[in-house]
Amino acid sequence: MDTTRLIIVAVGGQGNLLSSKVLGEAALLSNTPVRMSEIHGMAQRGGVVESAIVFGDAKSTIISDGKADVFVGFEPSETLRALNRCNSDTVVISNLAPLPLFTVAIGKGVYPDIEAARELIRKKTARLIAFDGIALAKEAGNPMSLNMVLLGALIQTGKIPVTAENVKETIRTKTKKAFVDINLKAFDLGFAAAKKCG
Amino acid sequence: MHKLLTENPGEKMLLLGNEAIARGAIEAGVAFTSTYPGTPSSEISLNFFQMSQESDLYFEYSTNEKVALEVAAASANCGVRSMCIMKHVGLNVASDALMTLAYIGVKGGMVILTADDPFLFSSQNEQDNRYYGKLSGLPVIEPSSVEEAKEMVPYAFDLSEKLQEPVLFRTTTRINHSTAFVKLGSIKPRVTKGSFKKDPLNYVTVPAVSRKLHVKLLKNIETAKGISEQSEYNFIEGNGNLGIICNGVSYSYVSDAVEGLNIKDKIKILRIGFSNPMPETRIKNFLKECEKVLVVEEGEPVMEEAVKAFAQEAGLCFEIKGKSEALFPRLYEFNPEQVQNNIAKYFGIPHTPAQVPDLSDVPEIPQRPPNLCAGCSHRATYYEIKKVAEKMDTIYPSDIGCYTLGMLPPLSMADFVICMGGSVGTSCGFSQVTDQKVISFIGDSTFFHSGISGLINAVFNNHNFTLVILDNGITAMTGHQPNPGVDMGNLKLEGYGRVSIENIVRATGVKHITMIKPYKVKKSIEAIKEALSYKGVSVIISEEMCTLYAKNLRLLKPRSFVITDKCKDHKNCVNELACPAFYIEEKRVKIDEDMCVGCAVCAQICPENAIMPLKKG
């Protein structure tokens, strides 16, 4: 089958490892071959955490610069920073709620302007789906469900060979029981938000 | 039940490479496991640790890799299948044991896993541990994928028993930390008890014995070579006359490139999975059918040099390349596009490289480096030492752990780091040849690992420095593994001893020992002043539990602080502590309530007393 390459970039602590785990398990349900790789040595120390997920028959577990078919950014400045992973055909999904850069707090540089960032990303890729994912996660009941919000938006694009039903089934069986309802709601809100972005 | 103990052959499971390796060992009937934790190998040990709590599998966190290897070597020489897990630099620590263990060999299967880290995602160097295979004479097995890693572990155990030698199982980060579907096999029953048969002429390595054992080792290498020639893990694919020889993750990139360039009819691939000893005849036969060969391997040109030597012996004179300026570097990890581009370039295959968007108009984005956590006690200790040493000409030798992150400004509290335990040893030399004040830092786990011998050296040779032991009660950096100083009661585990760092320091003969609680800023500063003015070896033990660990154990209930209207914007809190819980909003410092754990260090240094506990309404 054709290869689809997905990159997810987040800041340590935002829960992107769970979103890739859910995608992987959902791929297993869908009988879709999948390989992933993650660098999580610094996951809890506030650094940038990147997951590469390759659907299809490829053997590699990492994705070279310019080769992401779909890109999910958990934080707007990190989405912008990782633009070199995309190309003019890439579909980008990004949360727009920023996580402050500590380097900015100590006076080293300025946080990029979000509107300008949106414009840049839109210009250089095929499509940008961007919204305040934290607001939706809070609406679902927990800001930590941002990962499920973005998963919903990702599945809505139809770019990933995994069905919404299989992702929801995985959320039901593989995420913590106490959070299942919130996670499902977050997934639906993200799905709807992406639909609205057209 | 632990998922890796599942008895359901044929079931497909989504596993991390490290889980697949642990499962492979379980399927091989491994009964005895030991480690010192180190990324990227840590999850293998974590899974063994968890499984040992609900089965008869033995697992231990040893004090360092050398001890871990010795522990496992003894077990294997009693006939018990044993595995020892470490990161690449850990094998340096264990190498003394390794080199002569290769002479003695083993009775039960023994697999030594070494996890290399090309690109240094979380390491101090990117050494290529395949050289340890050559150096010790031990077989080296290298998987190319997560599934293969699981398959190869039982193979390595069988090989070890056949040869009566330990086997090195070499992975790289992209095997350890990749995830794929793995088909479970059946689990061989564990044999947990063995017996030791005295045989001093084969076990006690005095020179007369070792001279004979070295002969035996060389014979074993020959036998291993025969097995390597036949091994199903050294295989050939495709049938062109352009040859590629590759190993490990490079094989995945090569396969995808050959597919992507649509050159299956032109290229023949020799994948080496049993890489020491190299299958010489197989390689020579492969070369004879080629006109041009590319060697694709991350790290050092280990295979390339061997292949070139084989070609010379076989009288073959065509181009063989691998590492060169125009092709592959010895640095960092490879990626699929780089491999594809190099294959196309080397063999003259038409190809359009991936287009990366022009990013010249993207503004520079400030870095987001990893940082000590909000409320981390290391930050408090660093702040206090820095204050006391403000007017001193200092050297800060440091060590391997979370606290190495203190090198970043504004703390800037690390000047020299080479290896585990190196803070103490280097302090001896620095203090001897300079008139600068030497203040070194080491964590609790690293102190047990290899800091103690340096400290004894310092006392014996009467050096002059202050060692700060940052005791946060856990091995934090690699994901909260126990060490000999940890209270295992916190984990509700029985049957462990506990070693006091203070008692050890006292026993080495250090005369000036100071205990501080770093969250108490004034008191700590007073105590540090005294310790730093002491001539000779002084030790400060700074005790405060890792905040992440304390939160996990629910021993710490975060209580956020807030910056009140009394703030006159000195910004000492942000500029001197650099706690990630601070952020700036409309030019005012704010505290992120969700991040702040309430260590109150900033509240104690605020000149206006403007930082107060948040009253939840």
Image: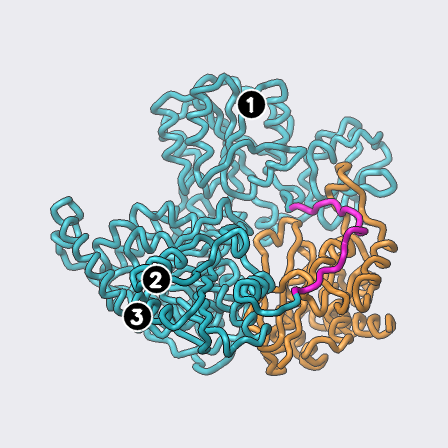
Chain colours: A orange, B cyan
**Residue occupying image coordinates x 81% and y 38%:** B589
The magenta-colored residue range is B353-369
Residue closer to the observer: A123 or A137: A123
**Mark 2, other Cα within 10 Å: few <14 / some 14–19 / many ≥20:** many
- Mark nearer the viewer, 2 or 1: 2
Q: Which residue is mark 1?
A: B394
User: Is tag 1's residue or tag 3's residue first in the polypeptide sequence?
Assistant: 3
In the image, what residue type sits under mark 2? Ala
Closest to the observer, B308 or B248: B308
For mark 3, does the 10 Å Cα neighbourhood hold few (<14), some (14 to 19), or many (20 or more) residues? some
Whole-number angstrom distance, CA of label 1 to CA of label 3? 58 Å
The N terminus of chain A lies in which quarter of the figure? bottom right
- Look at 62% across and 77% down and name the residue there: A27
Residue type at the position of mark 3? Glu
> Dot 3 falls on which chain?
B
Give the labeled residue for mark 3.
Answer: B229
Residue found 50% across the figure and 27% down from its top: B514
Q: Position of residue B303 (x, y in %)?
A: 39, 59
- Residue ID for mark 2: B311
Secondary element under disc 2, as helix, strand or loop, is helix
Q: Main secondary structure of the magenta part?
A: loop
- In this rendering, do the residues under marks 2 and 1 share a single chain? yes
Q: Gap in Å between the C-alphas at discs 2 and 1?
A: 56 Å
Above or below residue B124? Residue B466 is above
User: Which quarter shows the C terminus of chain A?
Assistant: bottom right
In the picture provided, is B305 more to the left or to the right than B418?
left
